[in-house]
Amino acid sequence: MRDLTLVFDLDGTLVDTAPDLVAAANHVLEHVGLPPIGEKDLRPFVGHGARVMVERAIGPAGDKLTPAEREELLERYLDYYGRNIAVGSRPFEGAVAALERFQGAGAKLAVCTNKVESLSRSLLDALDLSRFFAAVAGRDTLTASKPDPEHLLGTIRLAGGDATRAVMIGDSRVDVATAKAARVPVIAVSFGYTDTPVAELHPEAAIDHYRELEPAILALMRSSFGR
């Protein structure tokens, strides 16, 4: 794996961030006098960004808000989340062990996420994951963000890698679409936040646990990379 670049999505792929993102949404709901919403109901929107989370949480009550009031709630959400970014968030089972193996085997590792870079780095730092990654590209790091393929291709370049020797690992329709547009093989995890079974998104492979990731990558190396 020495000349391979592995690019990971963050929320729903490397880290289960739903507990803290839902807590931030409920903080906003409390502020406007609305009842809290359970994680199960908000979880499908976790990977769509802060603005979508706030809008989905507020629901029809948001129709009465002015644009300025909407922005104030978004800022309140982001402020609360930034201060409580790793209260309940944890790496998915087996993720850290997999990163250690890949790093030890000489692979370049990177994160390509639509979370802003500052929050991405704060989360990775809090969970002691930053040490694994040669590059972290958030939605504001480059001039493009997923599903634009340039976000993924730019991340690979930042990591010092080669797009012809790279694999994307993600959990959503956006991740799969980004990788396909970039002509980079993609492995989808089934335990993320998509409401569509990942096999229906037609990735090159789908896994249910991080123990399955290395065999899936090795199979891709044989088929896609000719060895």
Image (cartoon, rainbow, N blue to C red):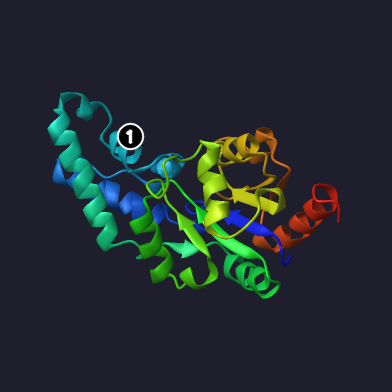
In the displayed structure, does residue 165 sit left or right of residue 72? right
Q: Position of residue 87 (x, y in %)?
A: 34, 65
How many numbered discs, if any? 1
Quadrant housing residue 122: bottom left
Q: What element carries label 1?
A: helix
Specify the amino acid type for callout 1.
Arg
Residue under the image location 28 percent in, 30 percent down: 59
Residue under the image location 67 percent in, 39 percent down: 183
Image quadrant where one finds the C terminus: bottom right
Q: Can residue 80 be seen in this view?
A: yes
Q: Nearer the viewer, residue 118 or 22?
A: 118
In the displayed structure, does residue 139 sit left or right of residue 9? left
Quadrant housing residue 219: bottom right
The crowding category of the residue bearing disc 1, from other C-alpha atoms within 10 Å (few below 14, some 14 to 19, many at least 20), is some
Residue under the image location 40 percent in, 70 percent down: 125
Q: Nearer the viewer, residue 208 or 175?
A: 175
Q: Please, is residue 140 above or below residue 15 in the view?
A: above
Q: Please, is residue 28 above or below residue 17 in the view?
A: above
In the displayed structure, does residue 52 sit left or right of residue 201? left
Q: Position of residue 167 (x, y in %)?
A: 67, 51
Image quadrant where one finds the N terminus: bottom right
Residue tagged 1: 56
Q: Position of residue 142 (x, y in %)?
A: 42, 46
Q: Is residue 193 visible?
A: no
Q: Position of residue 43 (x, y in %)?
A: 43, 44
